[in-house]
Amino acid sequence: VDSGSLDHVCAAIRENGVLTNLDLSYNNFAGRGCAALAEALESNSRIRELSLRGNNMGDLGARALEARLNESGKLAKIDVSDNGIGIAGGRALGALITRAKSLKQADFSWNAVGARGTLDIAEGLKSASIVRLNLAWNGLGDAGAAAMGGSIRENQVLQFLDVSSNRIELEGARSIADGLHENQTLRSLQLNGNPIGDKGVVLVIEAVGVQ
């Protein structure tokens, strides 16, 4: 989408009072384009599902979304996967899920928030209303897994968590298992593609078994 067309899209978002599901995936808006969309979305409180997947938004776009999305809106589902979001963007996403109380599903997969960005997402998750969170392919490592384990321990809303393919090893699996011991709501945990080994698998299974 070129800049001229984006202006029309933004104007339509601001003026439309009927649309509830908006999918603008893979349009290469980049950071500035996503920031412009975020500004337009600030004026629209009816959108319930938003997908900006694969738009190369980076940290700039993630920060713009966090700053602009209407707290009093009805957004229930957001997909910003495959967007080159890094540590700073991860911090913004953590703030977003804390502030947007209507948000129930979030897909942050295929980014690069790493362990440091995950700290803020995990902290936000403790008080968020999210029931489904996808963090697959984000380079969490054991440090990020430890943060998520702490969040799982306190969160009593989340039902689905995907941390697949995140370079999580035995210690990370141990942290997640520790969190599961105290959790009563999680129904699906995706850990595939992580080198947790047989011991890590046993730890998680044992934690699930005490529920």
Image (spheres, rainbow, N blue to C red):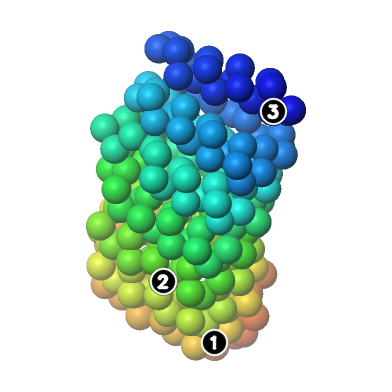
Amino acid at the residue labelled 3: Ser
User: What's the amino acid at mark 1?
Assistant: Leu
* Image quadrant where residue 16 sits: top left
Disc 1 secondary structure class: helix
* Separation (CA) of disc 3 from disc 2: 35 Å
Q: Nearer the viewer, residue 35 or 16?
A: 35
Q: Are marks 3 and 1 in contact (CB under 8 Å)?
A: no
Q: Does 188 sit above or below residue 140?
A: above
Q: Name the image quarter holding residue 186.
A: bottom left
Q: Which callout, 1 or 2, points at the residue further toward the start of the chain?
A: 2
- Please state the horizontal and vertical placement of residue 160, each as a whole percent of the image: 44, 53
Q: Which residue is mark 1?
A: 170
Q: Amino acid at mark 2?
A: Leu
| Pointer 3 or 2: first along the chain | 3
Q: Where residue 3 is drawn, which disc sits there?
A: 3
State the quadrant of the N terminus. Answer: top right
- Which mark, by number, is residue 119? 2
Query: x, y percentage for residue 19?
Result: 47, 16
Q: Quadrant of the C terminus?
A: bottom left
Q: Is residue 208 visible?
A: no
